[in-house]
Amino acid sequence: MSIHKVLIVDDSKTELMFLSDLLTKNGFTVKTAENAEEAFRRLSEEKPDLILMDVVMPGQNGFQLTRAVSRDPQYADVPIIMCTSKNQETDRVWGMRQGARDYITKPVNSDELMTKIKALS
């Protein structure tokens, strides 16, 4: 599966702009959502090839949203990369157990993120 469409879920406008800019420059089509509710709306509009998921957000957090998306038969095949400031090993393990395929900590290293995305393609 090749990755073209990416959904970024993050409540930080700065992070959304940084990641959107990075991915757009690398040829990806990007949609964004600032919370779980908006993320599900975006998912229903157009299924992405990849989701970049923040953890700390108001309302439903990224761990909960990852679990909900990865257990939904309609979206279970969409890989999720957790993209978060939570840098403890226990957070990484928990994120992977919720259904994430990979985990990257903020501040995001552009090369590392591109490598992780290519690995999923």
Image (cartoon, rainbow, N blue to C red):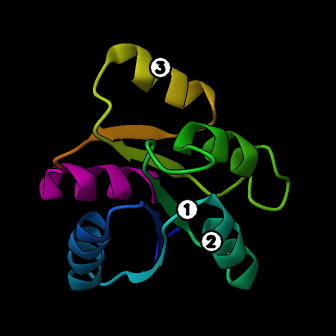
102 or 66: nearer the viewer: 66
Give the CA separation, mark 1 to mark 3: 22 Å
Q: Relative to 36, say whether 65 is above or below.
A: above
Q: Residue placed at 65% from the left, 39% from the top?
A: 64
Q: Relative to 101, say whether 117 is above or below.
A: below
What is the number of the mark on residue 35? 1
Q: Residue placed at 47% from the left, 19% from the top?
A: 93
Q: Residue placed at 41% from the left, 25% from the top?
A: 92
Identify the secondary structure beneath mark 3: helix
Q: If you read the primary sequence from the N terminus, does the residue marked by circle 2 or circle 3 appear first?
A: 2
Magenta stretch: includes residue 103: no
Q: Which of marks 2 and 3 is in front?
A: 2
What is the number of the mark on residue 93? 3
Identify the secondary structure beneath mark 2: helix
7 or 111: nearer the viewer: 7
Give the residue type that dot 3 points to: Val
Graded by Cα atoms within 10 Å as few (under 14), some (14 to 19) or many (20 or more), the crowding at tag 1 reads many
Graded by Cα atoms within 10 Å as few (under 14), some (14 to 19) or many (20 or more), the crowding at tag 3 reads few
What is the number of the mark on residue 38? 2
Q: Position of residue 38 (x, y in %)?
A: 62, 71
Q: If you read the primary sequence from the N terminus, does the residue marked by circle 1 or circle 3 appear first?
A: 1
Q: Relative to 25, say whether 10 is above or below.
A: above
Identify the secondary structure beneath mark 1: loop
